[in-house]
Image: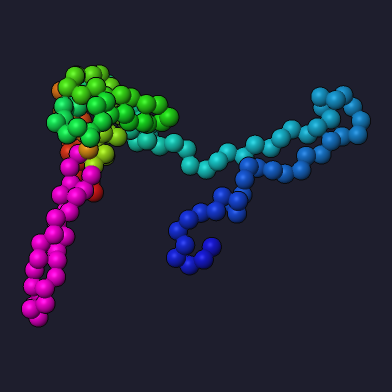
Amino acid sequence: MARGKRNLEAAEQIIGQDRPRVMKSTGPAKQSLEPAKIEPVPGPVSKDKLDNLKFNEDILTVMVHDSTNPSDHPTPEVWNDGRMFVFPRGQEVEVKRKFVEVLARSKKTTYTQQKIKDANGIESYRNIPHTALMYPFTVVSDPSPKGRDWLKKILAEA
């Protein structure tokens, strides 16, 4: 792999656990092929990961706010783990936390420009970002006591 290259070429990796298997020349057919050697893959799933997966299956009550912008989608759709959930605006719905996470990560950033002068008196522009949710929403109820901190952390991420 070239220096600085961050992608991983799957075709260059070891795929599966292929190895030759010997077939006996005599004896019953069921016993003629030696058993496959199965090697466990290192790295069992951690308890933290299992707890997080369970946490993401919690059912929350959420309401996506109405919008006065005619170009906004009337029923935002989010996908997680190959499944779609449609949020009707202005209605409380019960939904798994993993779909709320997609809503919380759906952000848009716009920029305004401010004309400034640097220390040498040269004019330039400073781009000021303004980030907002694409689909503003309210969590009406959350069964987990750590749900509030979880959501605040996601919303604060870039």
Give the x, y percent position of residue 61: 21, 21
Query: Does residue 112 show up magenta in the picture?
Result: yes
| Front position in the image: 65 or 8 | 65
Quarter of the image where one finds residue 53: top left
Vertical placement of residue 122 versus 37, above or below? below
- Residue drawn at point x = 84 percent, y = 30 percent: 32
Q: Seen in the image, is 7 located left or right of residue 80?
A: right
| Front position in the image: 85 or 61 | 85
Outermost residue to the front? 70
Q: Seen in the image, is 141 located left or right of residue 42?
A: left
- Residue drawn at point x = 11 percent, y = 73 percent: 123
| Magenta span of residues | 108-133
Query: Does residue 123 show up magenta in the picture?
Result: yes
Q: Seen in the image, is 120 located left or right of residue 93?
A: left
Q: Seen in the image, is 12 located left or right of residue 56?
A: right
Instruction: Classify the position of the N terminus by image quarter.
Output: bottom right
Quarter of the image where one finds residue 124: bottom left
Vertical placement of residue 93 versus 56, above or below? above
Give the x, y percent position of residue 65: 16, 27
**One can see residue 58 in this view:** no
The secondary structure that most of the magenta stretch takes on is strand
Colouring chosen for the image of the structure: rainbow
Give the x, y percent position of residue 148: 17, 32
| Front position in the image: 30 or 98 | 98
Vertical placement of residue 1 versus 101, above or below? below
**One can see residue 140 in this view:** yes
